[in-house]
Image (cartoon, coloured by chain):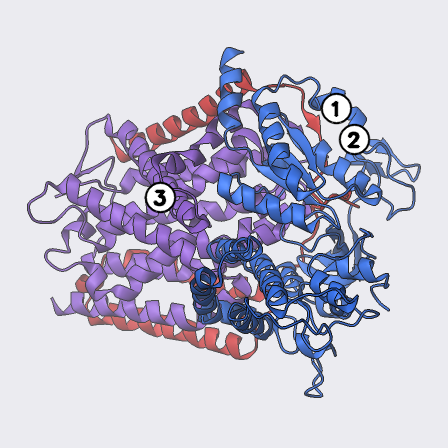
Amino acid sequence: MDLTRRALRAAAARPRVLPAALPGGTPARLEAERLLRLRDWPVAATPAGADLLLVTGPDCPALHDPLARLWGDLPAPRARVHAATAAEVASALDTGRERLAAWSGRGSGAQGHAGGNDRVQEPPEGGGGHAHGQADDGDTGTGMPMPGGLPMAETGPDRDGLALDRLHLALGPFLCDWPTGLTVRLVLQGDVVQEAVCEDPAAPGGTPFWSGPWLRAAAGEPVTAGAAARHRAAATCDSLGRLLAVAGWPEQAVAARRLRDGLLAGAPAGALRGPADRLARRVGRSRVLAWLTRGIGRVDGGRTGGSAPAGPPGADGDATDRYRRWLDRLGRDVRHLDDPAPLDPYATESPRGPWEPAHPPSAALLALLPALLVGAELAAARLIVAGLDPDPEELAGAGVAPRG
Amino acid sequence: MVERGPWWTVAAAPLLLAALAALAVAADALLAARGAGRPVTLTAAARPFLALPRALVAGPRRLPAPDLLLWRAGVVTVPVAAVLSTLVIPFGNTVVADPSVGVVWFNAMEVTTWAALWLAGWGPNAAFSLIGGYRFLAQGLAYELPLMFALIAAATGAESLRVGDIAAAQQGLWYAVWMPVAFAAHLAGVLAFSFLGPFAHPAGRDAAGGVLGELSGPDRLLLQAGRWLWLASGAAMAVPLFLGGGAGPGLPAWAWSLVKTLLVLALLVVAARRLPVVRPDRYVELAWVVLVPLTILQVLVPALVVLGR
Amino acid sequence: MSATAAALSLLGLAALAVLGLHGAARALRVSADPLPVMPFGSGLEPAEHAVSRFHVRWYTVTMLFLAFDMEMVFMYPWTLVVSAMGPGAVIEMFVFLAILVAGVVYAWREGALRWT
């Protein structure tokens, strides 16, 4: 037992963290990502590979069940902490580490049956027909045995008219390198998306973080163009970080996120230009990345009458065109960080496109998703979402439905 | 001349392989620390090994209706096959065994990862894992043939499938020098069967960890270790096949083997970080239309040289 | 020690290491009670078992691969006899390979190497 305690203490020096970002908590998420990077606490992709569930952002009742699902799937020893604001993140991480180091199986969400009370008890009937999986092999009244309480996949026609097994899989709400609060329900045949439905994002309330300067300027508050450029550059780096992580290039994803953290921390313009140019050179000029993203998520921005789905001009082209435009804009923005002129929120593009209070740009990006995702492989689907990178917070902030 | 070592080399070979894999993990951790703006220290290099105590204390999980037998068989096969591949890899002038079909043995051990990773993806009965397992099969269709032609190019040059003979046949001129395409195809193949770096698609973060997604505790550690053991094994195999084995001036043969292996390993660790994931839906076309014909032409070169001798 | 004995010894050692790791984990783990969990679904419950007939759209590539894999069975022994058999061996092997590559080119033109 003493050896176990020593191993627990040793392992707690580097907890693997499963981040769960709640809508409206972007500053807390950014602070968490920064601290995890500096502390070398690896970010886990699934509960199986995690020790610490880190919830960031204001409490969101609509997401209680998915959070309980994640927490219930973490193997012991485990700990769960919640940081509602950026200021609470550091202490929440410390608390989590202490709980892991002193794990006793009691109090901090015990393994097995003792932990049963924080699990999802019974999903609502008819909510996609999910059966609870913890029951022993039982019957559902139809006479079909249901091992593990789950039905087998059923077949559906594919594009060639074959009847093939279909799996239902949701991307989001809690998925690594995924827009906060977004849920896309997929029907997959193999790893090919057959149907895609975007759910209405969970409403966070409050002002969306990334378009904040535009909202404030529109409301008459003084915002300088330099501050807006810094904010937009940071937003671009955040999007790039997600795209590069999804594209499987952790080295450059970390570089983009470091630059983002530097921008948000108010680092002087001179210190940021070098990293920004390096990112533009390594990522923007990478032929391999361009080859891998070419033709993915092609959108017709109104310039040609092609067969691609029509979208806003800012989303024109494929994933390669879009990330190259991000890098160009990033390069321009880091040269205007000290611009003292006031921001004209209607003349200057917000991070995700021209700002209109009634039609936030993310609404148009989200509306594009279902048509683009159908027929894509899972990897391409992730690249499409990360390459458009809609911000669901904008919709909730403006009170607009996603497909309005 | 490569000779069969005494009985204790059976134990020494896996230990050496594990040490090389650990060095690769530490080097990768240092590069990651530099990239993330953390201090590049010995502690930073040692931190990934905290996964060992973590794996030992983890409580077990039970998924609904998993295929436990096949799942575990798949996971265990990856590191075990990596260890078995060391049977034919000479270190200096010593090798555990030098069978007349050493190259085929290495190839066969490497091919078991196809079955192993598919099983590791199938076993947990989880959608993301299943996708990860199939991703490796698609990747295998792309990397395997260029790798096999690379191995055959080296074997043709020496007219032997005995690894020791191939190392000895490169007196003065390494195969890497006059068979650069085969050497490059071998290195790409090493990254591919280790599913690291540009070939990490089966364990991709975009599929929530793929084959790694539902693994916890010792099983997760075994599969992760298997990746790095294979990287070390592939780097060590490149030395007798393409870099003249233990031959070199001044130093003893074992030292040359060590230096060359470490250099190849360093090259692989750096290259793995430099590239994004190359998805099979793009790589298959490149592999079949460009790499397969190129490596076939590469085999023709040693065949003609052998005829001319 | 013969090669077979050495291979079996290596296998035994590797199996011992795996068993040792699992044994140590069994002795040190904080709980022996398996935690009932669900496969990861981004926080949502799975709707059905994941094990299913997977739509493999690259199946035509597997046919090509099979042809080349059979060819490899001939090519490994061929490497040993190149100089003994003379130019005939090289010509025969590469004519065979050329026929296979012609098949690859045909499959490529038919779009078999692209499935997205």
In the image, which disc is placed on residue B27? 3
Q: CA distance from mark 1 to mark 2?
A: 7 Å
How many angstroms separate mark 2 from mark 3 (CA)? 41 Å
Q: Is residue B246 left or right of residue C91?
A: left
Residue B74 lies, in percent from the top left, at 53, 39
Q: Which mark is residue A119?
A: 2
Q: Is residue C102 visible?
A: yes
Q: Secondary structure at mark 1?
A: helix
Is A285 left, or right, of A360 in this rendering?
A: left
In the image, which lettered chain appears blue? A
Output the letter for the chain in purple: B
Q: For the point 42% across and 24% down, which residue is it?
A: C16
The chain containing the residue under callout 3 comes to: B
Residue drawn where x is 84% and y is 70% of the image: A358
Q: Quadrant of the N terminus of chain B?
A: top left
Q: Residue at x 51, y 75 (%)?
A: C108
Q: Residues within 10 Å of mark 3 (few under 14, many from 20)?
A: some
Q: Which residue has dot 1 on it? A: A115
Report x, y in % for residue A169. Answer: 74, 51
- Badge 1 crowding class, 10 Å Cα cut-off, few under 14, some 14 to 19, many 20 or more, is some
Q: Which chain is red?
A: C
Instruction: Point out which mark residue A46 bears.
Output: none
Mark 1 — on which chain does it sit?
A
User: Looking at the image, is B152 positioned above or below residue B41?
Assistant: below
Residue type marked 1: Gly
Measured as percent of width and height from the top left, residue C48 is found at 78, 45
Looking at the picture, does residue A273 appear above or below residue A203? below
On the image, which quarter does residue A352 sit in?
A: bottom right
